[in-house]
Image (tube, coloured by chain):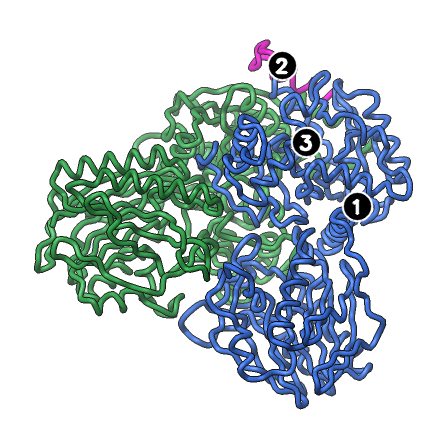
Chain colours: A green, B blue
């Protein structure tokens, strides 16, 4: 049997483009003599559809699309994923299903049993878990078809009380196929390989695994679909961050032979290299899928905006990036020079819009109220917010999308101005700690100087008052970031973090800042997710709460 | 047996105040001779704790609090709710539990079986559902203790495949007790009474039901705890929107006798009267629980800001409301007059901050870029955003919290400026359609004129360009609001809404506007929830999606 794996980029709710893409690949695979082509989980509607799934019409459109796809399966069978109506009146109204389509008909339906409902996942919000399990017979092979999480319960302290493959194995299948929607995090590719390898060797079956690729707003799917033999040896690993289709011959002894040169990585990319690729794809798909072309951002001369600008230029082309320099009376000369150097290095468009006339107007207008009270955070924030108003005015006039340039460290401790530098359509590096932003800058400079060296080596500053430095109010980033990671990624208590050797007052102060900033993060743009725990949908915190604050 | 029901206002994560309040009520009830006092679901930590529940330390703090509470139960037993560690290594790490505490010891633990995971609920994110059921024997009575949703599966098309009371009833209990965290929506009180009445008569048992009261950021708990006899007759209904403790005598024949005058409503309040009470509580608790005192808002002379100002003055006292008039060159004379009249009627504080000097500074600064292009939405938004910067500057200088004044109709269609009038710490009427805002204004004027009549009768306008009216770009609100409600609350398709008699082009245009505005709503403040489907945590939509847009 010849099996094709289609690792494709879908668009949530865009039935027209998703269906056309699936049918196109069915035709291609048919021409190349494949017996079966496998698409990813919920490919028909894209992932995650979120509460679109609560609209009956949306579910009908999925079924309509599936029928169109079925009609194109003549000499070839296919597996697609879509939400379907739960036929049992008890339980949730939907199932997360896979259709096995043969000769123009839906020959078998498999429903997902293990529904991820943590971090960014909300599947039990919509779907009833399956409690029945059955293999599919096709051309003399018995296929154990499962959906994503169904294979993820082999770990210690398992999240679920059942294990679908333990049921399916009793029917003596010849092969496992798993269709997935497994988003990127910089440590997730290895975890995925290990879990799937474990399944292949545990059940002594070859395993074909198909993932999504492409970004849906903040969620980035990295592809990296996998093929294992029955001993758990990795036969092939599809490319990361790119669409790809590959073909395999499966024989009666369950041996798997790739029909093209394999693309398995000889060496795993570094975390930073992966994050770089993920952010490029995230920016590109945000613009492509929302129908916008040009990004704008404020260039301060600092490292965050420089890195975001370089990523945007790579993702969209420098001609589609409008960098805006917005100096105030507190901006240092080197800041403007550093920003100009970056613009030159990237060859992107730029404008200079000094904001002192604007901030003076605010201060003059507010004189009766401010009544000679000393300069404080109010005047600092006026600068940051004036910049945001200018940038948004340019967006409104010229149809740009504003890129947010906040990093994860400052988003964590609330070191940013709401409606000021926290604005934007999408946050590019909001899941990248400041120390990682420095690494990213060095990575961007791997072939030539793009990020000006002075931007990398000078001490970080918001430049909202004379001689300000980030370290005036925050610990050094190489202290701050590990504390933040222990709290945010690993949910350690203050006592546990202090036990790791960090200063008690610093730890308590930092965690308090994090929890006090929830109200700010609630109103910030979606953040491209590259870590196992990003701010946004995957981290849901009370705002008016009192823990550690 | 004498049973006390304690309907109290907790604060998420504030173990100190929650524990003190629970212990205080145990002592009071003990003095009054109660055998058992019943507190609400998850009262120890407050509801919803959201991802605080993922911190092991948080769970330990819950257990510590429970042990402190247990030590105070000498002559009296109590029922409290808290998250506990799941002792089974398989499944989620936590249970949503009730402790039955007697003689200083946890005598029985009941775990919730039906975990709501829809709308604003995320319980399956944290908790493993119980699959075992056992009654509790206490002073010769057998108690069927369940937690909130456990009793909500009696409806047609049930959400769950099990029904806990069907198991518990086999042990022949004498009484049902249900501890709950059931948030307000204007139609929810009747639904709640019907479901619980159905349980009492179905199982032929008296039922004691204890709810939370008080707001946790956007979620407002309305109290209204209930007592039914074994025939399903309503014996008592505790007050809405207020803390309350009441006592009942339960005899061996399962008859229930209230030990104080009952507070059952003779007539249900109107939706608007309930919404009014909910919003007052929502504002008050937002400020109380976050430790702020003074609200500010921009007063335009229009109905939305007028209603929010009046609600804030009622909730916080007029001396704690700073209304700011921010006229531009497009503000009409009557707008300023109407705003001033409101300030007089309320006797709140006010400031006048004309913004024309600021908007001119923006336009002058942007002249090189705007290059004589015609006035459009860019200049309109500059006005709205300039007002936001002024209001936030006052917040930063004086420690105010900005109230957002957007209504649900405009939030729905994106008729508002991101980082402009969409700013604020909390949105007061973001779940109230414009037609309901008019009703609310009339309700606020029920005793005397608070909202100036001219504010109510003039045509709504954003006043961002000369002679602008909302109806220039939107249908009349009495057409728009029902279309929105059918789509948002009932998730109808365009075809279904058109079939109800609405114009096809209007319907398609409105729904498209709703779906195109997701990116704006993503960045708006938490919205006090008063309907069964509010924007925010209870409605999770793709941003870069393509359905109907």
Q: Few, some or many C-alpha atoms within 10 Å of disc 2 (few <14, some 14-19, many ≥20)?
A: few
Report, in whole angstroms, how far the alpha carbon at label 2 lies from the one at label 1.
37 Å
**Of helix, strand and loop, which mostly describes the magenta segment?**
helix
Q: Let me know if residue B366 is in the magenta part.
A: yes
Tell how many labels. Answer: 3
Question: Residue at the spot x=68%, y=31% of the render?
Answer: B477
When the figure is inspected, residue B363 is found, relative to residue A250, above or below; the finding is above
Protein chain holding label 3: B
| Left or right side of A152 for A397 | right
Report, in whole angstroms, how far the alpha carbon at label 3 lies from the one at label 1.
32 Å
Residue B386, position as x, y percentages in the image: 69, 27
Protein chain holding label 2: B
Residue A48, position as x, y percentages in the image: 42, 46
Tags 2 and 1 in contact by the CB under 8 Å rule? Answer: no
Foreground residue among B192 and B33 = B192
Tag of residue B375: 2
Mark 2 and mark 1 lie on one chain; the one further toward the N terminus is: 1
Tag of residue B294: 1
Callout 3: SS = helix
| Left or right side of A427 for B185 | right
Report, in whole angstroms, how far the alpha carbon at label 3 lies from the one at label 2.
27 Å
Q: Few, some or many C-alpha atoms within 10 Å of disc 1 (few <14, some 14-19, many ≥20)?
A: many
Residue A318, position as x, y percentages in the image: 39, 23
According to the image, label 3 marks what residue? B477
Identify the magenta region: B357-375
When the figure is inspected, residue B76 is found, relative to residue A66, above or below; the finding is below
């Amino acid at each position: 049997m010849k099996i094709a794996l289609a690792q494709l980029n879908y668009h949530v709710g865009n039935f027209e483009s998703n269906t056309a893409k699936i049918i196109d690949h069915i035709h291609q695979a048919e021409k190349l003599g494949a017996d079966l082509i496998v698409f990813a989980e919920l490919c028909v509607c894209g992932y995650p559809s979120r509460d679109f799934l609560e609209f009956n019409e949306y579910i009908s459109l999925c079924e309509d699309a599936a029928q169109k796809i079925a009609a194109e399966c003549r000499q070839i069978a296919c597996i697609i994923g879509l939400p379907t109506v739960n036929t049992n009146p008890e339980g949730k109204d939907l199932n997360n299903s896979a259709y096995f389509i043969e000769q123009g008909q839906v020959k078998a339906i498999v429903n997902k049993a293990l529904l991820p409902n943590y971090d960014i996942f909300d599947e039990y919000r919509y779907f009833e878990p399956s409690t029945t399990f059955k293999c599919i017979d096709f051309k003399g092979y018995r296929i154990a078809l499962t959906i994503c999480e169904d294979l993820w319960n082999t770990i210690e302290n398992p999240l679920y009380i059942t294990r679908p493959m333990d049921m399916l194995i009793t029917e003596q299948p010849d092969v496992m196929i798993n269709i997935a929607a497994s988003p990127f995090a910089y440590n997730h590719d290895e975890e995925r390989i290990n879990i799937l390898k474990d399944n292949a060797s545990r059940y002594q079956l070859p395993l074909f695994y198909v993932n999504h690729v492409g970004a849906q707003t903040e969620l980035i799917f990295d592809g990296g679909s996998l093929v294992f033999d029955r001993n758990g040896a990795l036969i092939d690993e599809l490319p990361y961050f790119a669409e790809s289709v590959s073909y395999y011959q499966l024989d009666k002894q369950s041996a798997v032979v790739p029909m093209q040169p394999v693309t398995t990585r000889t060496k795993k990319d570094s975390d930073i290299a992966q994050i770089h690729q993920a952010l490029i794809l995230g920016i590109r798909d945000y613009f492509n899928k929302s129908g916008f072309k040009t990004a704008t951002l404020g260039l301060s001369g600092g490292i965050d905006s420089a890195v975001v600008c370089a990523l945007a230029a790579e993702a969209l082309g420098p001609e589609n990036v409008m960098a805006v320099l917005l100096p105030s009376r507190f901006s240092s000369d080197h800041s403007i020079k550093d920003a100009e150097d970056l613009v030159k290095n990237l060859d992107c468009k730029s404008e200079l819009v000094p904001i002192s006339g604007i901030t003076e107007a605010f201060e003059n207008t507010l004189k009766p109220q401010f009544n000679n009270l000393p300069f404080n955070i109010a005047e600092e924030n006026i600068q940051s917010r004036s910049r945001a108003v200018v940038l948004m005015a340019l967006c409104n006039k010229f149809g740009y999308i504003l890129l947010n340039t906040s990093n994860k460290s400052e988003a964590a401790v609330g070191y940013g101005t709401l409606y000021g530098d926290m604005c934007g359509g999408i946050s590019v590096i909001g899941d990248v700690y400041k120390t990682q932003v420095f690494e990213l800058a060095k990575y961007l400079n791997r072939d030539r100087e793009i990020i000006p060296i002075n931007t990398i080596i000078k001490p970080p500053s918001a430049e909202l008052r004379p001689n300000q430095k980030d370290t005036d109010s925050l610990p050094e980033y190489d202290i701050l970031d590990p504390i933040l990671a222990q709290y945010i990624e690993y949910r350690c208590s203050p006592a546990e973090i202090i036990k790791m050797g960090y200063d008690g007052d610093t730890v308590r102060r930092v965690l308090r800042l994090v929890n006090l900033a929830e109200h700010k993060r609630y109103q910030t743009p979606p953040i491209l997710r590259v870590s196992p725990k990003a701010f946004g949908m995957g981290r849901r915190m009370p705002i008016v709460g009192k823990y550690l604050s």
